[in-house]
Image (spheres, rainbow, N blue to C red):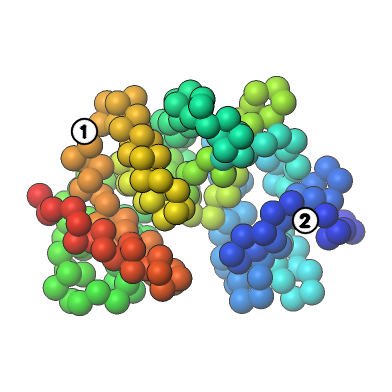
Amino acid sequence: MKINLNQIVAERGNKTIYRDGDFIVKLMNEGYTAADVLNEALNHVIVYEAGVLVPKFHEVVKIDNRWAIVMDHVAGRTLDAIIEDDPTNRDKYFDRFVDLQIKLHGYNAPRLRHHTDKMHGKISECGLDATMRYELHMRLNGLPKHSKLCHGDFTPGNVIITDNDEAYIIDWSHATQGNASADAARTYLRFRLSGKDDEMAEAYLNKYCQKSDTARQYVDKWLPIVAASQSVKRKPEEREFLLRWVNVVEYM
């Protein structure tokens, strides 16, 4: 397949997204390993086969020493862009966003890695002192080990709404199976990291807890663990913010 990289759709920290006719080409920066790219492609295929509405995967290719994932182009707008253009209806869009996340948590994808294993590895790498790492490992071990599909980076920017009002979920590089409240904690921290008003993060989490019938205190238990595991290889200012959350929520 000949790939044309003339039309840039989006640029993110470590990748550039191109459109080539009916295809999207997700081109990773140099330094992205084959294992990283193949893992993301595998996650994408697993959730597709589980029945989640995602763009159809085509192939992994190498372009000028950079790895790329090729998938179908889905015509539409991100939920993030829709909310930005119509902030007065944010509550309505958040309803849909949370409903989509709760629906994702109902899927079964047993071939995905369990997030408990991934988080233990990340906590070991996070650079905190040995006592704090021990407490985080022990707390993680003490939390219920579920097997729900977790996106790992579920934000409005990763939801595409088509002209037919279908919702496609993209960017599955962090997908795991595990506890849904950990996934919600990750989304909450992503809202806080985005630089937007904190009210948005609180509105999201309150709505998630209400709709999923989950106690806020239960999600709070996950925040230090998720923050520590997500601090690895972050920009210095993001890492500093995340590590503050390790101490913010009282251990219970």
| Other residues around mark 2 within 10 Å, as few (<14) / some (14–19) / many (≥20) | few
Going 60% across and 72% down the picture, which residue do you hit? 33
**Toward the viewer: 207 or 178?**
207
The quadrant of the rendering that contains the N terminus is bottom right
Of the residues shown, which amino acid type is indicated by label 1? Ala
Of the residues shown, which amino acid type is indicated by label 2? Ile
Residue denoted by label 2: 8
The image quarter in which residue 248 lies: bottom left
Whether residues under marks 1 and 2 lie with C-beta atoms below 8 angstroms apart, the answer is no
> Which secondary structure lies at badge 1?
loop
Going 25% across and 50% down the picture, which residue do you hit? 222
**Toward the viewer: 234 or 50?**
234
Image x and y of residue 105, in percent: 41, 35
Query: Label for residue 204?
Result: none
The extreme right residue here reads 2
Q: Is residue 112 visible?
A: no
Q: Is residue 234 visible?
A: yes
Image x and y of residue 31, in percent: 61, 76
Q: Position of 112 compared to 220: left or right? A: right
Image x and y of residue 194, in percent: 46, 53
Alpha carbons under labels 1 and 2: distance apart: 42 Å
Residue denoted by label 1: 215
Going 58% across and 30% down the picture, which residue do you hit? 86
Q: Position of 12 compared to 119: left or right? A: right
Q: Earlier in the sequence, mark 1 or mark 2?
A: 2
Which label sits in the foreground, 1 or 2?
A: 2
Q: Position of 121 compared to 97: left or right? A: left
The answer to whether 31 is drawn above or below residue 101 in the figure is below
> Which secondary structure lies at badge 2?
strand
Image x and y of residue 199, in percent: 36, 40
Going 40% across and 46% down the picture, which residue do you hit? 197
